[in-house]
Amino acid sequence: MKKASLLLVLVAMGSCGLLRAQSFEVKNDNLRVTSLNGFWRFHPGDNPAWADPKFNDSGWPLLRSDKDWSTQGYPGYAGTGWYRFEVTVPAGMNAAAIYLPRIMTCYQVFADGRLIGTYGKMPPNPEPYAGGRYHLYELPAGNGRARTVSIAVRVWHWPGWVRFFNGGPSRGDGLVGDRSEIDRREALESASLHWSLTSYQTLALLQTLAGLGTLALFVLRRKEREYLWFSLTMMLSAAFGFVNAAGYEHVWNVAQRDMVLDVLQVSAGLALIAFYAALLQPRRGKRYQLAVACSAVSVLLTPILYLSGALVSIWIVNIIWAILWLPFHVWVVSMVVERARRHSHDAGLLVAPVVLSTSANLFASGAWITYTLGWQHRIMLRVALTETPFPINLVQVTDALFLLAVIAILILRFSRTRSLEERLKSEVQAARQVQQYLIPEHLPATPGLNIDSEYRPAREVGGDFFQVLPPEVDGSVLIVLGDVAGKGMEAGMLASLMVGAIHTAVAFTGDPKRLVGMLNERMCGRGQATCLALRIERDGRAILANAGHLPPYLNGKELPMEGALPLGTIHGIDFPVLRFKLCEGDILMLMTDGVVEAQNAEGRLFGFERIGAMLQQGMGGGAVATAAQEFGQEDDITVLTVVRAGAEIAELAELGELAGLRS
């Protein structure tokens, strides 16, 4: 039986010169379709006359319709070729259609010499197109009569794909017959195609959700750039997956599609480098610089190579691209392992996913390169882990594992940072409560003196402090003003230490010089602070001790204070003392260096001259503080204004205080 079948095939092939074309007859039975698997006439070259149904193609060789032309005597052939065959449609089948298998690359379909369909762009201005779907074309109506239709298929195979794919039909399963039956076959094929792309689309969807989620985290924490870079990486990777899947379902220029895919992929790689740099803070040595440089070159080089006319050597583009990205893979693996060895918790969680993902991508890239160079034809370019219910490859699995690992790391990182913020918030709240003792909101009554304060902290907790101690038995008032070196929480805690030391020292002495000396001994080894200690007697006599602080202004003029070192610099310093008198109506203004050191956008300081000019114009402490703050505040601003009231006002104030005590 086998010998007889073989003999019939040989006879058919030997008598090909007597045949005009292979004929496929549609039976008018329950099936109403027939397969196009068999022998089609083929001829390389291009001639419009070959679409004519009267053309004698008996001299053309017969090629199997379920195999490409390269494996049937035309290896490496690129360009235009023609297929011809006939179909017989039974009577009564007016709506008939032909369902061609997937043909590489572009083609036109003629029925009885009339063009009934085109896929892609054909010569004389061809463009490489490709798609994963079968294509249906309706045959001319037959008016209810049986008829034989001559089919001619003009095929153009892109030279850029010669190393990857062979020309002509890549598989069988073509059909001809009743349109409604073929529509159902097409629906099944479309569903099968969608199902085969599920893994690509599912991974792209996961990457989209991950990108949106991390973008939301970035909106909440704008200073932490790792969320932004990972979001951008996922969005670009998702776009790559969706575009890649769309290439199987839609007619698309291959060169343009591949250029878009490569640009998306290398852009995602650059965003991934920025993500690693923000997350793990690696050393930016030569390997890092080489990885960034090669990645940036690949972004610029990819569209240039595609648009420069090098489409015929598209495989060279892929090799160059793979070589340029090798330093990136080496840097990522070595950097993550190194950071994990340095006990980075985030890097430790990333080691396994990064190594697996990098290995899978390098294997796929190496298999592709060796395949295009003709060194091997057995290793699958995408190692399939499953075929059912839908295909899943190794790269997809490792990419999904990497995605899940990074999401877990970012969530844990966000939780850690949030917990730290809550702890810091509670500490700041406690420091604010302490700050009330450093900068009292309500000053004690000081008969004969009107004291006003202006305080503008540069941060939530400042380093300035002042204390107005109630009048002693002799009616004198003690005022201490200072500024701790530094800013923020640390300065605030040191300032609280100073206030405690002031209250302790006042229990032993009311002399400004001795007081400053005791504060100096307390501060040595703990930090530094500038300070003014001022004692004002009931008759207006004043004693001022200075420890490196700005001199006060009396009636708009700077007092001639001798300079000194700040508190905490050296043990046993002899601090200078200035004696003067406040007359009725005199205005004494004390301030911290936050006023003088206010700095605008051009780098200019607020300065002593500006302060003196404002005071000469009669501006108060509030106006000075506001002007310095608006000029460009750099440090805490504190301004104390002391005005000696007249005798009548002082007496009324004293009487009011006594009345309050009696009530």
Image (cartoon, grey):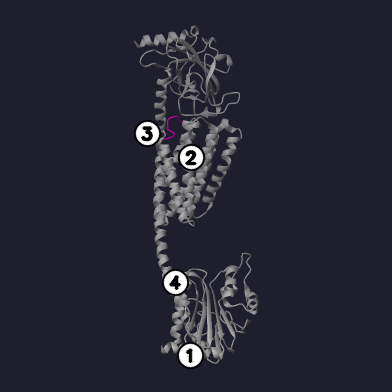
**CA separation in Å, label 2 and label 4:** 51 Å
| Residue 54 in sight in this render | yes
Name which residue lies at 55% across and 13% down: 52
Amino acid under label 2?
Phe
- Is the magenta region chiefly helix, strand or loop? loop
**CA separation in Å, label 4 and label 1:** 36 Å
Which residue position holds label 2? Answer: 240
Which of the two labelled residues, at mark 2 and mark 4, occupies the earlier sequence position?
2
Which residue position holds label 3? Answer: 390
Name which residue lies at 55% across and 33% down: 255
Q: Is residue 377 above or below residue 448?
A: above
Labels 2 & 4 near each other (Cβ < 8 A): no
Query: Regarding mark 1 in the picture, which secondary structure is present there?
Result: helix
Labels 4 & 3 near each other (Cβ < 8 A): no
Which of the two labelled residues, at mark 1 and mark 3, occupies the earlier sequence position?
3
Residue 184 in which image quadrant? top left
Which of the two labelled residues, at mark 3 and mark 2, occupies the earlier sequence position?
2
**CA separation in Å, label 3 and label 2:** 20 Å
Labels 4 & 1 near each other (Cβ < 8 A): no
Mark 1 or mark 3: which is in front?
1
Query: Regarding mark 2 in the picture, which secondary structure is present there?
Result: helix
Which of the two labelled residues, at mark 4 and mark 3, occupies the earlier sequence position?
3
Characterize the local packing of mark 2: few (<14), some (14-19) or many (20 or more) Cα atoms within 10 angstroms.
Answer: many
**CA separation in Å, label 1 and label 2:** 85 Å
> How far from the left and from the top, in percent, is residue 633?
57, 69
Specify start and end residues of the magenta stretch as a single range: 375-382
Q: Quadrant of the C terminus?
A: bottom left
Which residue position holds label 4? Answer: 432
Q: Is residue 277 above or below residue 14?
A: below
Residue 381 colored in magenta in the image: yes
Farthest left residue in view: 1
